[in-house]
Image (spheres, rainbow, N blue to C red):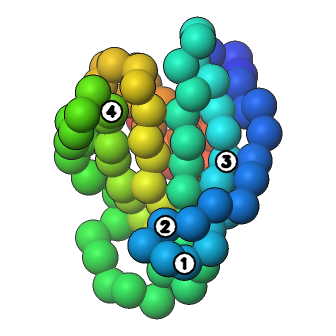
Amino acid sequence: MAAEGFALVGGRLDYLHGQRVAVLVYRRNQHPIDVFVPRGAGARKAAPGFHSTLTRQGYQITHWQAGGMDYRAVTDASAADLQRFGKAWRMASGGTP
């Protein structure tokens, strides 16, 4: 996804609602985009694809399901950048734009 302006810069283990989660860290210009991947979340039934983006305290937040996994992305980049990130993610995972 680096070719689309979203370089993978690292990863870490973190906590979300008291549960340990993997976090992939991408960068768009000087803005990090943290993608949280909760363990065992694929068992929940939710509509596939990207869901609407929320803004809370200056951060853009979105979530989606793909390949039986649940993802949540948080960034201080613009909502438009987060939408571009979603498109790049879909393209990188073999989906449609």
Query: Most extreme residue toward the top, as rendered?
Result: 29
Q: Quadrant of the N terminus?
A: top right
What type is the residue that disc 1 sits on?
A: Gln
Of residue 56 and residue 27, the one placed in the foreground of this image is: 56
- Mark 4 packing: few (<14 Cα in 10 Å), some, or many (20+)? some
User: In the figure, 46 relative to 66: above or below?
Assistant: below
| In this picture, residue 8 sits left or right of residue 28 | right
User: In the figure, 78 relative to 67: above or below?
Assistant: above
Horizontal and vertical percent position of residue 35: 55, 48
Residue shown at 48%/60% (left/top)? 71
Q: Are marks 1 and 2 in contact (CB under 8 Å)?
A: yes
Which numbered dot is residue 19?
1
What type is the residue that disc 4 sits on?
A: Tyr
- Which residue in the protein does label 3 denote? 24
| In this picture, residue 56 sits left or right of residue 68 | left
**Residue 80 falls in which quadrant of the image?**
top left
Query: Most extreme residue toward the bottom, as rendered?
Result: 43
Q: Quadrant of the C terminus?
A: top left
- Which residue in the protein does label 4 denote? 59
**Residue 38 falls in which quadrant of the image?**
bottom right
Distance from Cα at disc 4 to Cα at disc 3:
17 Å
Any part of residue 21 in sight = yes
The nearer-to-camera label among 3 and 1 is 1
Horizontal and vertical percent position of residue 75: 44, 32
Distance from Cα at disc 3 to Cα at disc 1:
16 Å
Of residue 87 and residue 41, the one placed in the foreground of this image is: 41
Distance from Cα at disc 4 to Cα at disc 2:
16 Å
Q: Find numbered disc 3 in the image and state the secondary structure of the residue it sits on.
A: strand
Horizontal and vertical percent position of residue 29: 58, 10
- Which residue in the protein does label 2 denote? 16
Q: Earlier in the sequence, mark 4 or mark 2?
A: 2
Q: Find numbered disc 4 in the image and state the secondary structure of the residue it sits on.
A: strand
